[in-house]
Amino acid sequence: MSNDSKTIRVSVEHLGKEFKVPHERHSSLKSSVINFRKRSFETFKVINDISFEVKEGEFFGILGRNGSGKSTLLKLLADIYTPSSGKLRVNGQLTPFIELGVGFNPELTGRENVFLNGAILGLNQREIEEKYDEIVAFAEIERFMDQKLKNYSSGMQVRLAFSIAIQAHNAILLIDEVLAVGDERFQQKCLEVFAKIKQDPSKTVIFVSHDMGSVQKFCDRAIVIHDGKLVYEGEAKGAVYEYKKLNFPEQITGSDVNEESKDRWGSASIVLERLKAIEIEKPDGRHNIKMTLDIRVQEIKLLNKEIACGVAIWSAEGINIAGPNSLEYTLTAQDGSVEYLIENHPLNTGTYKITAVLYDATSGETYDHHERRFNLSVAGSSNREIGTVVLGGQWRQIK
């Protein structure tokens, strides 16, 4: 079946959403009543004249930095918000993977919440019972299912909610960045679910992510939103290019929209302004590697937030030698630096590439990912010309 003849699952025509923000704040009910007629508002347009269509079987991406209007658009699609203008039609049952766990009751156990949330998503008791072990195993919280949900961490709650939600039968899925939870292994499991969903021609997916690699891997088409307006609609590769052009213009070299630029991506809410990597010779003849990462917070609201820095080392041939090695810490200032020291490093003489990434330590959201953009020259570790690392072993003769 050609794409043109497929059913249109989501139709958005000149969609707009605005909020009224009061100029005055009142500290009491009495003050609010007395000054009700005097109150003035400022109208703030979050979504401004957006139009697009999503067809059955499509994996459709939505890109834009924080504050661009992505979350508001998803809530409009999920019928959480009512449009201020335009038309919105959803043809089919929809499962919103946004604000997961809204139907959870903190006073109930994890087991009880599986049945409660499953029922909200349209699963009957028999289906939930049949899928229960699979849900719990996927969430990786088997030992905690008889504890009350209020004792769960936020990550455990979201993992459980996601594990339940993927069992729903609905044809349209809204997948937000909230799915980037847990450790790398759990995130890989989520990606495997996306890959399985993509193979089902009856499933339509609307996918919001700051991970440009995932967008290019899964999405057939994508749009880019900037300041509430649609600035691009087309193939995923072109959307990634436009997103980077808006947020990292200094990294774009060339005007060909089909040119893949894979070296840097992220929301740019926090950026890595510089990474300096040097080899240092010690008095005992051994060598250390010191990497200094200079970080700047673009959005003040992210101060006092737990973030993670990670670095990986690659050979000139593109082989991953080490990493990612990461550090989690709390941002306390808008500008700062962290240092990564490798003592008595084993690298052989040569030139290496470094990948560096800044991301949310809890949700996994990527702030700034530099893929092999930094150089490291190693000169003093060995005079040998073959191999990548110096093992440092010792030979001995045995009888």
Image (cartoon, rainbow, N blue to C red):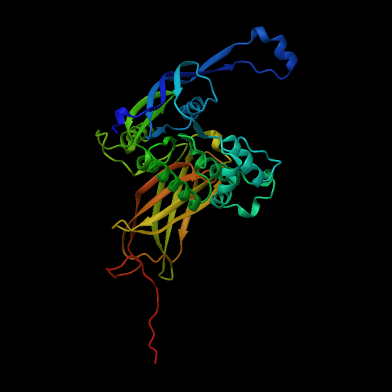
- Residue at image position (53%, 40%) is 165
113 w.r.t. 345: above or below: above
Residue 347: horizontal and vertical position, in percent?
37, 64
Residue that extends furthest to the top in the rendered view of this protein: 37
Left or right of 306 in this view: 395: left
* Residue 182 vertical placement versus 252 (above, below): below
- Residue 19 locus on image (x, y percent): 54, 18
Could you tell me if residue 291 is visible in this image? yes
Q: Nearer the viewer, residue 232 or 263?
A: 232
Q: Position of residue 16 (x, y in %)?
A: 46, 18
Q: Quadrant of the C terminus?
A: bottom left
Is residue 272 visible in this depiction of the protein? no
Answer above or below: position of 317 versus 370.
below
In the visual, does 186 lie left or right of 53?
Answer: right
Q: Nearer the viewer, residue 209 or 375?
A: 209
Which image quadrant: the N terminus? top left
Residue furthest to the front in view is 126
